[in-house]
Image: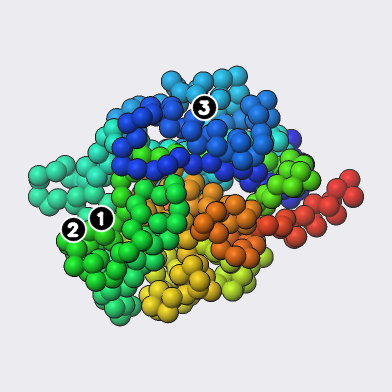
Amino acid sequence: MNPANRPPVEAAVLGTGQTHHTSRRLDVSMAGLCREAIDAAMADARAGWDDIDAIIIGKAPDLFEGVMMPELMMADALGAAGKPLLRVHTAGSVGGSTAIAATAHVQSGRFRRVLAVSWEKQSESNAMWALSLPVPFAAPVGAGAGGHFAPHVRSYIETSGAPLDTGAKVVVKDRRAGARNPHAHLHQPDITVEQVMAGKMLWDPIRYDETCPSSDGASAIVIGDSVAAREAESAGRGVAWIHATSMRTEAGTYSGRNHRSPRAGRDAAAALWAEAGIDDPRAEIDVAEIYVPFSWFEPMWLENLGFCDAGDGWKLVAEGATAPDGDLPVNPSGGVLSSNPIGASGMLRFAEAARQVMGRADEHQIAGARRAFGHAYGGASQYFSMWVVGAEPNEAVASLRETQDQAL
């Protein structure tokens, strides 16, 4: 057991894997979908089943797929038979929360390597209506997540003075980026702002292309302790050292709640930057993977996370700062706007951040990325999870632990 008051064991991402994402994966079962991502992550980590000490899984509500507690029938496929298995659930942020739970298992000192898996097979149910309250065809119809978030986007536009094409600019950036990602669901290399603005209005002011797709897909990560990470580095494989993690929660409704910039997100980010030793996130983060299911949430989250002042998020979009060649590249993988298997979307943001600092992001690699940010949120903007990973260990944690080891 890790003695009280000691800094946590250092942890690092050893390998990542993900499936190809599309609207219907009819070629695989739910178990097969997960195993596809798991096998890729294990191969990337150069790990075998005997190396894995525990399995952490996460997915969105069972209603999204119509299968209750699938982990009960999938233990063998997940490689969990005879090993500890834990399921995490924090709505849309669950992929990120699952990665953090796996990190905590390693940091406790009880597990050397932990496999984290998340997925969603949306084609087997209807997530939009699962998210609709009250039930369809009874007035008023708050249809789907878009129906819930549209008023918050409208509030942002009215209070920030953001130009109406801001969301369209985010769409064009992310979909063109997604065209360079072979795993992405949508590939639209030629999409334009004019095309997005001419699209159908779904939930005013959110247009058709300003929404994420509904995807089948899975993601997996292998996380190891410092011994496992050093072994990988000695073998010439880069790892992503986990510098800091953070999660916060708040109620969906209460008097004075700031729906445009929830306090839970702001508090989680402040704690994350402090733990990572970051004073200026925009200057010190090389690339960010931010959970943006509706395009307008990019400027909104940039403000919520402290990358800029309140009201300035849309200016970063307009200046091109968040483009792949900008000073703060956001979602070079194409992000949630290009692939959205809900339960896995958060872990994909975490995994893509890790891939960037490991130098294994293929065609969407950001040159020189040494420190990256992964982010997820879920529910009615109630759950937030995020991490910072780097190509080198967090010097502050490593130094403190070394000092205490010498004193023991």
Q: Circle 1: is it few (<14), some (14-19), or many (20+) Cα within 10 Å?
A: many
Q: Could you give the CA–CA distance between mark 3 and mark 1, rounded to whole angstroms? A: 33 Å
Could you say which is closer to the camera, residue 241 or residue 264? Answer: 241
SS for callout 2: strand
Q: In which quadrant of the rendered image does the C terminus lie?
A: top right
Q: Please name the residue that numbered disc 1 is placed on.
A: 146
Q: Is residue 191 above or below residue 163?
A: above
**Residue lying at 54% horizontally and 49% vertically, measured from the top left:** 351
Q: Are marks 2 and 1 in contact (CB under 8 Å)?
A: yes
Answer with left or right where residue 34 lies relative to residue 373: left
Mark 3 / mark 1, whichever is N-terminal = 3
Q: Nearer the viewer, mark 3 or mark 1?
A: 3
In the rendering, which numbered label is found on residue 202? 2
One can see residue 274 in this view: no
Q: Please name the residue that numbered disc 3 is placed on.
A: 78
SS for callout 1: helix
Q: Circle 2: is it few (<14), some (14-19), or many (20+) Cα within 10 Å?
A: some
Q: In which quadrant of the rendered image does the N terminus lie?
A: top right
Horizontal and vertical percent for residue 124?
A: 29, 32
Q: Could you give the CA–CA distance between mark 3 and mark 2, rounded to whole angstroms? A: 38 Å
Could you say which is closer to the camera, residue 333 or residue 80? Answer: 333
Q: Nearer the viewer, mark 2 or mark 1?
A: 2
**Residue lying at 41% horizontally and 49% vertically, measured from the top left:** 184
One can see residue 176 in this view: yes
Q: Circle 3: is it few (<14), some (14-19), or many (20+) Cα within 10 Å?
A: many
**Residue lying at 58% horizontally and 60% vertically, measured from the top left:** 372
Amino acid type of the residue tagged 1 in the rendering: Gly
